[in-house]
Image: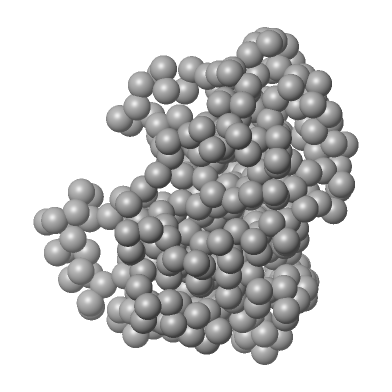
């Protein structure tokens, strides 16, 4: 098996053989570590097994693997140059597109990862306010830098000392958190919905979203939406636009360029000066190929109404899974937007059922995850979802047989 051999070799040259959220050692036993290729809504591992992909490379692939429009745009730019002495014209074109698309955006700054973007957004907020404290929901994931990583290894308590936690969707908790550091709140950072791993997802309550906006205004703090995970899968304009809530700063990445590495912070005119004052940069932040891919991705989502396509396929998947679970005697919760779905089993505190079911899904050609949310792409057709549901139905049957009536 090529995967097993690669894991053995990796152990010799990579700490632990793999690290971070892509470490397959922490998944169910059947999960492959190494992949050979992707096409549309499918991936193939190095041992040749084919999967209908509902992780979309953990979110970045929003149009489908190797989308021709994106690949052509990236290839055109690569033929001209990628990492040059300065950015290409595409940087201005992409910033203009973001400003034209996102109502809360008057400017854009670019980097590479979601962590870059959330960190940069908080730097802008602190530069603007001269304050230090940030209000953040308990358990929320905003990246892997020392200030926000879920693991304390290699960090110091001081690196998290300026965070004040509140309970997501609780205005009372948010207000109480603000009161503990009155006069020193630089920002409130929130995800568009609660998507903590190992827990059912929780859509934002509109009153909470509006209350967070009002509190930020009252405090003179920046409202930062971390749209890294949800951006471009709920609303191209921003995930809280439907509630009439516009942030001061937004962090973007994942689906922005259909798998090419890029992130962005967008912000309002009031924060243009503080953003300009930062020294925040990276040798590869201004690479032109990913910017060309991002422009093509956003334009394609816009012109093909890709989000509506994902909503349709996501609804088809959710309804099919509910029917299957019921038929096989399982009670399940399906939470989050249908474009960023997740399924959990009632009473499955140790995840034993989820782990068995997800492993069975793999054996039946469907790649999902037992404790992290999934992602839809615009490449998931009705036929693809129907084929995937054949695999999940068999997985439910195998799981029922394993655990009994």
The x, y position of residue 302, in whole percent, is 72, 73
Q: Residue furthest left?
A: 12
Quarter residue 2 falls in = bottom left
**Would you place residue 367 above or below residue 231 in this image?**
below
Say whether residue 344 is left or right of residue 156. Answer: right
Asked whether residue 367 is in view, the answer is no
**Quick one: 342 or 84, which is closer to the camera?**
84
**Quick one: 220 or 213, which is closer to the camera?**
220
Q: Residue furthest bottom?
A: 383
**Quick one: 35 or 278, which is closer to the camera?**
278
- Identify which residue is drawn at 33% across, 79% down: 36
Asked whether residue 160 is in view, the answer is yes
- Identify which residue is drawn at 80% across, 33% down: 213
Q: Quadrant of the C terminus?
A: bottom right
**Would you place residue 396 above or below residue 127 in this image?**
below
Identify the colour scheme used. Answer: one colour
Say whether residue 62 is left or right of residue 245. Answer: left
Say whether residue 155 is left or right of residue 239. Answer: left
The x, y position of residue 78, in whole percent, is 38, 77
Quarter residue 255 falls in = bottom right
The x, y position of residue 42, in whole percent, is 50, 81
- Identify which residue is drawn at 43% across, 39% down: 280
Quarter residue 287 falls in = bottom left
**Would you place residue 319 above or below residue 281 in this image?**
below
The x, y position of residue 368, in whole percent, is 54, 67
**Quick one: 34 or 282, which is closer to the camera?**
282
Tally of numbered tags: 0
- Identify which residue is drawn at 23% across, 78% down: 1
């Amino acid at each position: 098996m090529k995967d097993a051999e690669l894991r053995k070799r990796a152990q010799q040259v990579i700490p632990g053989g793999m690290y971070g959220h892509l470490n397959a050692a922490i998944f169910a036993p059947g999960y492959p570590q190494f992949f050979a290729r992707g096409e549309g809504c499918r991936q193939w591992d190095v041992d040749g097994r084919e999967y209908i992909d509902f992780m979309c490379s953990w979110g970045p692939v929003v149009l489908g693997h190797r989308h021709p429009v994106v690949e052509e745009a990236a290839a055109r730019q690569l033929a001209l140059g990628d990492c040059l002495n300065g950015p290409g014209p595409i940087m201005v074109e992409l910033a203009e597109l973001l400003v034209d698309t996102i109502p809360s955006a008057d400017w854009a700054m670019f980097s590479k990862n979601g962590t870059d973007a959330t960190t940069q957004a908080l730097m802008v907020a602190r530069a603007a306010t001269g304050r230090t404290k940030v209000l953040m929901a308990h358990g929320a994931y905003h990246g892997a830098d020392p200030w926000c990583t879920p693991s304390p290894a290699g960090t110091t308590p001081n690196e998290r000392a300026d965070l004040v936690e509140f309970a997501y969707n609780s205005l009372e908790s948010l207000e109480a958190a603000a009161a503990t550091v009155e006069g020193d709140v630089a920002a409130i950072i929130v995800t568009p919905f609660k998507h903590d791993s190992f827990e059912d997802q929780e859509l934002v309550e509109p009153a909470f979203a509006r209350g967070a906006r009002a509190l930020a205004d009252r405090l003179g703090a920046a409202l930062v939406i971390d749209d890294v995970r949800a951006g471009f899968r709920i609303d191209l304009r921003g995930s809280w636009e439907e509630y009439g809530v516009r942030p001061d700063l937004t962090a973007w990445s994942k689906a922005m360029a259909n798998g090419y590495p890029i992130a962005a912070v967008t912000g309002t005119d009031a924060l243009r000066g503080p953003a300009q004052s930062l020294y925040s940069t990276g040798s590869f932040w201004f690479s032109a190929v990913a910017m060309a891919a991002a422009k093509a991705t956003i334009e394609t989502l816009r012109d093909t109404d890709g989000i509506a396509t994902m909503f349709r396929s996501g609804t088809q998947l959710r309804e099919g899974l509910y029917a299957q679970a019921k038929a096989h005697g399982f009670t399940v919760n399906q939470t989050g937007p249908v474009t960023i779905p997740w399924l959990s089993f009632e009473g499955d505190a140790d995840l034993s059922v989820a782990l068995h079911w997800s492993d069975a899904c793999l054996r039946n050609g469907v790649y999902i995850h037992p404790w992290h949310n999934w992602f839809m792409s615009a490449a998931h057709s009705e036929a693809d979802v129907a084929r995937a549901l054949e695999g999940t139905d068999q997985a439910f049957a195998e799981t029922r047989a394993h655990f009994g009536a």
